[in-house]
Image (cartoon, rainbow, N blue to C red):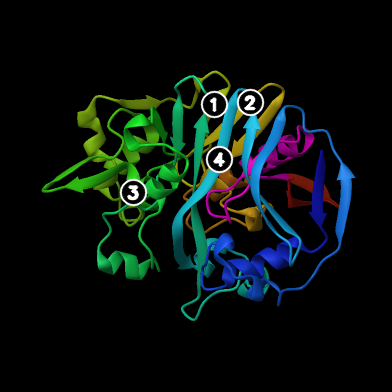
Amino acid sequence: MERRELGDRNTVLGHLEHLAGLHLTQVHAEVLAQLPHTHLRRSHVAHGSTLPLAGDHHASCGVWILRHVRVGRYEVEIFSDGIFRLDGGAMFGIVPKVIWEKTKPADELNRVAMDMSCLLVRDGQGHVVLVETGAGPKLTDKQKRNFGIDTAPALLDELAKRGVRPDEVTLVINTHLHFDHAGGNTHRDGERVVASFPNAAYAIQRLEWHDALHANERTRGSYLADDYAPLEATGKLELIDDRSEVLPGLWLERVQGHTRGTQTVRVSDGGATLYFSSDFMPDRHHLPLPWIPAFDLFPLDTLEAKRTILPRAVEERWIVAFTHDVPRFGRIEQVEGRYRFSETE
């Protein structure tokens, strides 16, 4: 099995991300053709039982986007609910704009475009797990304007493309309860707000549940109660305390940093591991240790988590994905002391 690796891949993907906030698969070939061409290096690598199943190959710039893998018994797919935009300075914290804008260009309002990535995890034995639900269908016009959301939520359409109906989802995992991760948990049915996945349990960290229900002046702008409060009435709310194996090899692990109750998702089976980092490390641009969003409530805890998790991801050759990057899988490498994201084919 081969992996293709680009010498200047981040530059190419940075250009793609900036093109009007379009999804990578929506960028036309004539636009791609204007981007810098790069040399492909080929090397044979051992992937254990992690098998690439499907992706998008953009031949004009040599970019391979892997969106579908198998990890042991689990088939895992990644897709986006849509694009939203946040202030670039807030996203990169203490990092000066003259540095971060080289890799993540801002629009005229100083906002950077980001995907709201979701995972679909299936084991072929009836378990259908959805990780994250995007911004959902309940935002007001003002909220959509403020967050630069120009399109309807794609979550249900993306599930339908994969042959999944809402009533077939058995477990929904929210890494935390901010609106861009939990908005699709519920929808309006007349005057009521009801669960969008009626047969699913919802797995959330207990600390996150408490903090979302008791938001303060610093945090309430990110929490919208209609995204999660109605779930309690379903009787299927599963509150996690720190660490839990919700299915064989599917681990939820609390990482304090972005919030007290942020949790990551780790799928380990058949000698391979896939890791979904949540917002404590929202995209590949935040791999450098000091690149920490100003949104993080506990930035020094974020720093310590990165110091612990990144070396393990490199050593054990985890497949990784990010919540706010172009939706695809890859690996983390360390080159000359610096962490970088590498596509996986």
- Earlier in the chain: of badge 2 and badge 4, it is 4
Residue occupied by mark 3: 183
- Earlier in the chain: of badge 1 and badge 3, it is 3
* Disc 1 + disc 2, Cβ < 8 Å: yes
Residue 253 shows in the view:
no
238 sits left or right of 68 in the view? left
Q: How many angstroms separate mark 3 from mark 2 (CA)?
A: 28 Å
Q: Position of residue 138 (x, y in %)?
A: 26, 54
Residue closer to the observer: 345 or 90: 345
128 sits left or right of 35 in the view? left
Q: How many angstroms separate mark 1 from mark 2 (CA)?
A: 8 Å
Residue occupied by mark 2: 268
- Earlier in the chain: of badge 1 and badge 2, it is 1
Q: Residues within 10 Å of mark 2 (few under 14, many from 20)?
A: some
Work out which quarter of the rendered image holds the N terminus and state it.
Answer: top right
Work out which quarter of the rendered image holds the C terminus and state it.
Answer: top right
- Residue segment shown in magenta: 305-331
Q: How many angstroms separate mark 4 from mark 3 (CA)?
A: 20 Å
Q: Nearer the viewer, mark 1 or mark 2?
A: 2
Q: Position of residue 17 (x, y in %)?
A: 59, 66
Residue occupied by mark 4: 77
Q: Position of residue 285 (x, y in %)?
A: 65, 58
54 sits left or right of 238 in the view? right
- Earlier in the chain: of badge 3 and badge 2, it is 3
